[in-house]
Image: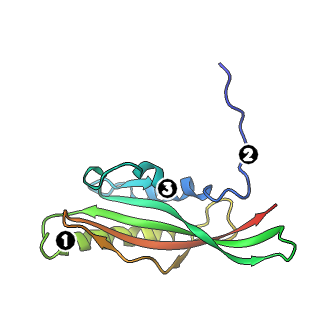
Amino acid sequence: MATAPVVPAHPNNFLEPEPHIVDRLKEALKGLQPAVHVLTATDLSGIKEENQPTPAVHVVWNGFRVLEARADGAAARLDHTWLIVAAVRNVRTLKTGEAVRAQAGELAARAGAALMGYRPPNVAGPMRLAPAPGSGISAAGFMYLPLAFLVETVFQR
């Protein structure tokens, strides 16, 4: 049986940091009870809210912006945004949302602390905290508390 050839990572691969971010979070969150799932956008595709594993931290690439581009267009510095979303479900205080907010806040704090200053391979600098979208809460007791991190790369021909 033939095996696929090993292809080296391309320096312009926007998603290369993802598995490293996932591993960093898994290491930082291991041992918590209940166990925390670390999921990517691929893991979450097609899952209905009521069936998603919680508590969880979602790792989602959310685009980039150009910081600087060479005049000849052959290279550019980019800031990529990675969303790290604490996703929890807690119906203990469903009416006030107090329990779910406390749980989401604690999980987001732990995940954020694990990534502040972390430098995945294939990037030009450490992960930096940035403004994030607002949180979301559902009537079923789910809460999503996002953090946003920027990480710089150099994109070149």
Q: For the point 27% across and 56% down, which residue is it?
A: 33
Tell me residue 133's x, y (percent).
42, 76
Question: Circle 3 sits in a helix, a strand or a loop, which is it?
Answer: helix
Tell me residue 74's x, y (percent).
84, 67
Question: Circle 2 sits in a helix, a strand or a loop, which is it?
Answer: loop
Split into 4 quadrants, where in the image is the C terminus? bottom right
Q: How many marks?
A: 3
Answer whether labels 1 and 3 touch (C-beta < 8 Å): no
* Along the line of sight, the residue nearer the viewer: 143 or 56: 143
Q: For the point 73% across and 45% down, which residue is it?
A: 8
* Along the line of sight, the residue nearer the viewer: 94 or 32: 94
Q: CA distance from mark 1 to mark 3?
A: 26 Å
Tell me residue 12's x, y (percent).
72, 58
Answer whether labels 1 and 2 touch (C-beta < 8 Å): no
Report which residue position mark 1 lands on.
Answer: 99
On screen, residue 58 above or below 105: above
Q: Is residue 96 left or right of residue 63?
A: left
Query: Furthest residue to the top?
Result: 1
Residue type beneath disc 2: Pro
Residue type beneath disc 1: Ala
Q: Is residue 67 left or right of residue 24?
A: right
Q: CA distance from mark 3 to mark 2?
A: 20 Å
For residue 99, which quarter of the picture? bottom left
Q: Is residue 59 left or right of residue 107?
A: right
Report which residue position mark 3 lands on.
Answer: 22
Q: CA distance from mark 1 to mark 2?
A: 46 Å
Report which residue position mark 2 lands on.
Answer: 8
